[in-house]
Amino acid sequence: MPNDLYDLPLTTASPAACDAYVEATRLALTFYPGALAAYDRAIAADPAFALAHAGRAQVLLRQGDVAATRASLTTARELTASASEREASHVAFLERVFAGETDAALAALYAHLDAWPRDALVVATASNPNGLIGGSGQLGQKKQVASLMDRLAPAYGDDPWFASYHALALAEDGQFARARALAERSLAARRDNAHGAHAFAHVCYETGDLAAARAFLPGWLADYPRDGFFHGHLSWHLALCEILAGNAAEAGRLYRDAIAPDRHSGGPQQKISDGAAFLWRSELAGHPRDTAAWRALHEHALAALPRPGNGLYDLHVILAQAVMGDAARGEAAAPDARARQIEALAREGRYLSGDYLPALARGFLAFERGDDDAAIEALSPLAGQNERIGGSRAQHDLIDFTLLGACLRANRLDEARRLLEARRPDAAGPPVTGLEAALGGASSG
């Protein structure tokens, strides 16, 4: 029986199917183009190869093709009767994730990885900031992911892909020295791994080493295919550095070139979160509003994600709706439309972060209409709960910076100082207009 990329047996008698599956897994894990085509080659060589259909489903879900994902997972499940126990467990886990059965999926995750810790595609699905654990709506998930990756590390040795994921988990947990060492080791061993570049970008942001990020990312992106899934997201990371450096022209160029929805290489959710976060944070830093960019993003959001489902991405749809306000047409485009939908789901126990995001939305809507006292009253009680929507701490900064901006605009400077004192040491930013003028040296560090 042949083995996969991590020496786990595969139920296929076709060498061609095995080779294509191994290649597809490598591309899927490193976020390089070609994974879907490689899974298709594996299926063409062996149509009964359950894991090839399951791998195909993971790539399709990343791209936002829900119907095709469902079809591939259904085929994979039907084929598990002749698959191994590990393969059947792998497919069953993915089905629970896709179905939104979070508690059952989490239980299945730990049982599966206890038995097969080197099942890397399962690890990837669960452990990134927007994965199963990150999207669970739970507090304490950063520590949970870091602990999981520490526990799995002996099974992977010096593997560069695992090191990149481990590095990001540690950075999110505040273990920056370990994270940087792992990210650098990963990139030295395998430069063509978008997760290695991603982990390094996060470490630089969290430690305030913007010079390193600005020196590294342009060259790495120049070698990374434009249709690579992370091209847009890593361009977003670079654009944040340019905002922090006061280089608005370059930040805007990056947005137009690689972050705007018609240029972004990622799936629909990533396009919306990166685009809205860039535009909102650019305004917080004092740059003028790009109404045309917001309008295009808003239209894309309503078309691509018409219904709520994921806290991080729903937050950014809420931002677009707040900005467009009465300029948007129709009930679905109203400023509070997404928040009202989420409130209804939360009342039925069908939204993982409960009522947190509707409460957050009230703060953003108040900030947008210039009612800073109302924004502060809505956002302040939610401090420390950002994990509930998933995503990274770099993404959560948008929430904290908005609250800080409201405090500055309302001249509530003691509250602004307390926010700065509570900010994690050495993290980049905050690029909020008026900060230096209001607080002087208190904003440095």
Image: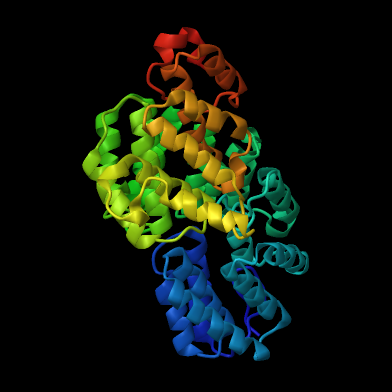
The residue lying at 73 percent from left, 48 percent from top is 147
Residue name at image x 63 percent, y 49 percent: 166
Residue 313 makes an appearance in the image: no
Residue nearer the viewer, 424 or 335: 335
Q: Number of callouts in the render?
A: 0
Q: Quadrant of residue 225?
A: bottom left
Residue 48 locus on image (x, y percent): 55, 90
Q: Nearer the viewer, residue 16 or 64?
A: 64
The percent position of residue 429, horizontal first and vertical second, equals 46, 25
Q: Say if 136 sits above or below 423 in the image.
A: below
Q: Name, please, the residue furthest toward the left.
A: 292
Q: What colour-coding does the image apply?
A: rainbow
Up/down of 358 relative to 51, above or below: above
52 is higher (above) or lower (below) than 64: below
Task: Residue 343: give x, y in percent of width and height.
Answer: 54, 52
Residue at image coords 58%, 40%: 386
Q: Which image quarter: residue 268?
A: bottom left
The front one of 102 and 128 is: 102
User: Does residue 40 appear in this view?
Assistant: yes
Residue 183 placement (x, y as % from top left)? 56, 43
Q: Quadrant of the N terminus?
A: bottom right
Left or right? Give the position of 367 relative to 17. Answer: left
In the depicted structure, whether residue 208 falls above or below residue 349: above
